[in-house]
Image (tube, rainbow, N blue to C red):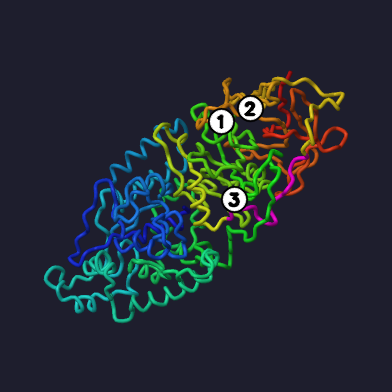
Amino acid sequence: MNLKKMLSFILAAALTVSATGALPPVTAHAAVRNTTFTTTAQMKQKLGTTDAGTWNPSYLTEVENTYWTFAPQNNLGSNVMTIDIAKNCYRQLEMLLDNGYTMDYNTLSAYCAEYLGKKNGEPDAFYSTMSSCLGNPYLLNRPAATVTATTYNGRDYSKVFDANFYLAAHPELASSIGNNPAELLRYFVENGISQGHAGNASFNVAAYAAQVDATVAANQLASSSYRALGAGHPAPVGKYSYSWANYYGKYLGHYSGAALTAAAPATAKASAGIDPSQITDIDSQGPDGGEDSSTPIPKTVTGAAAVAGGLSVYTNGPVSAAQANTRPIAVMMPTDTAAQPSYGISHADILYEIMEEGGISRQMAIIPNWTGLSRIGNLRSCRLYYIYAAKEWDPILIHFGGVAYMKGVINGPDVNNLSGTYEYGVGGKAPGAGQFFRSSDRSAPHNAYISASGIQKACVQLGYLTTPRAGYYNAKHFDFASGVNDLSGYANAMPATTIDLSPVYPYSKSSFTYNAAQGVYYKNIHGKAQTDAANGRQISFANVIIQNTKWSQLDKKGYLGFTMIDSTEDGYYFTKGKCIHITWRKTGEYTPTRYYDDNGNEIKMNTGKTYIGIAQKGRTPVFR
């Protein structure tokens, strides 16, 4: 969830205050949300299902949709928002504003300390932002707001509040507050606003809300997510919010970038590594909850390519039409020792490995047959060059954040991605973040996962196609042999029954051992068999490609860049216990990478899975 939407939600998640001015009781380790949110029963009546993961955003306000997206299943329909939602899902807290929002400070503080303790390294943006949040005076011990006759915590309410008018309209306050403009304003902000009280004679919040809601309804009816439902569905709710405080805040401009920047502590902005100029107006959202149409960033590409069954584009093996018409997922997985083994990696038809900063490599698994997997991961962050490797497969990219160099690519209109936190590390959105989960059998950051059902729900919510997209899908990537290619046609083919990639990936020490009986290479990592945690199987490949690639170090932190689109580099192709020298060519972002022998002919790949090691030019594998 990006800063803009997160702040919108926090502002919207004000406590409902009773007519007596008393706050509703707060459950231990929880924050109470607005009790007027749409309930599970109401959504079942509207859409015929109690599964909040499939509820279309067009039927919900942004506030509701955010809550239901991040709520645990056992919280659906309840009035309690647990601390787990805050600590696991609102991963980039900038501040908790007024309007009565409360949270268990000690629990959140303990989690923040625990998170840092398990990082074993430099604090990241998540920890820094959480720490700044914990130092926010609105959260720390909940001190009383600073109020003047016209301002509440620095926000000007003079456009909507007149003390004399309010006291005359509420004579019951004469004995408890009297003619005290500052305390009358405090009561109005903390109590009256949530009840829709009029603060002066010139502003009618109900009339203003009707105008805002009419615009919201029109935008929702015109949205692609609503149109995709087809005929026969009820009209969207068409409400900007169920909290009067949000209409007041919108009218007063409290949700603008300037207002948020001014209200946030300077330490929070600096430590989070967030450029205040990037905090845009929350109210500049288009009908699909994205940016205003003047700067559209559509995340849905309409139209699908019909793919016939027959032979898999990934492995050349038999595949049904249903499977052929399912978009693959591209999953970022770690090579860290503590993270092994990964769940679902044996289902990867294509597996990439590329170096990153810190002298460690990372993997990206292209998994076409993913719909039956209950646990996929663990999941790690992405890098820019992985996006270019992924694009040629037109996948749904699944990752847990990334780096600033990805900005402008990961959030481009052509990319469909799910991210457990800010998609490029210091900013962007967190599409589908509510569908990620953490396990208790490993320590963070090695315990983040997603399931097939979570992917499917997120795709419904985000409007992502789960079928190949017309204009992006490629029916051919490899030139497969009609039979078996044992490289006997090459006089210069070299024996290669073992492949040692430790010169290329010194941390993971990836290596392969050829099994002649099965005709595949079995992969090892850290000197041991690399297996799938879900089934215990060692992963294996019919084809192993080492792709020498130009690279550079981008900054002092050691972030790397790779030239993924090129036509001048070489590499090696391993299959059936032998190896030949090759060259490779990739001419565009969605164009498949082609591999050629030294005679200029495209190499004939063997049926089966393929490992592609992107090697820094100058690092050479050892094989015998």
| Type of the residue with mark 3 | Ile
Examine the image and state in which quarter residue 201 appears: bottom left
Residue 475: within the magenta?
Answer: yes
When the figure is inspected, residue 304 is found, relative to residue 204, above or below; the finding is above
Could you tell me if the residues under marks 3 and 1 are in contact, i.e. CB atoms within 8 Å? Answer: no
Q: Position of residue 294 (x, y in %)?
A: 58, 68
| Closer to viewer: mark 3 or mark 1 | 1
Q: Position of residue 423 (x, y in %)?
A: 53, 48
Q: Name the element at disc 1.
A: loop
Tell me if I can see residue 404 in this picture. yes
Please tell me whether the stretch drawn in magenta is mainly helix, strand or loop: loop
Q: Nearer the viewer, residue 42 or 555?
A: 42
When the figure is inspected, residue 233 is found, relative to residue 418, above or below; the finding is below
> What residue is shown at x 85% (from left), y 26% (from top)?
490
The residue where tag 3 is placed is 410
The residue where tag 2 is placed is 505
The residue where tag 1 is placed is 335
User: In what quadrant of the picture does the C terminus appear?
Assistant: top right
Q: Earlier in the sequence, mark 3 or mark 1?
A: 1
Q: Name the element at disc 2.
A: loop
> What residue is shown at x 80% (from left), y 39% (from top)?
568
> What residue is shown at x 79% (from left), y 41% (from top)?
567
Q: Residue furthest top?
A: 624
Examine the image and state in which quarter residue 198 appears: bottom left
Could you tell me if the residues under marks 1 and 2 are in contact, i.e. CB atoms within 8 Å? Answer: yes
Spatial separation of the CA atoms under disc 2 and disc 3: 26 Å
Q: Name the element at disc 3.
A: loop
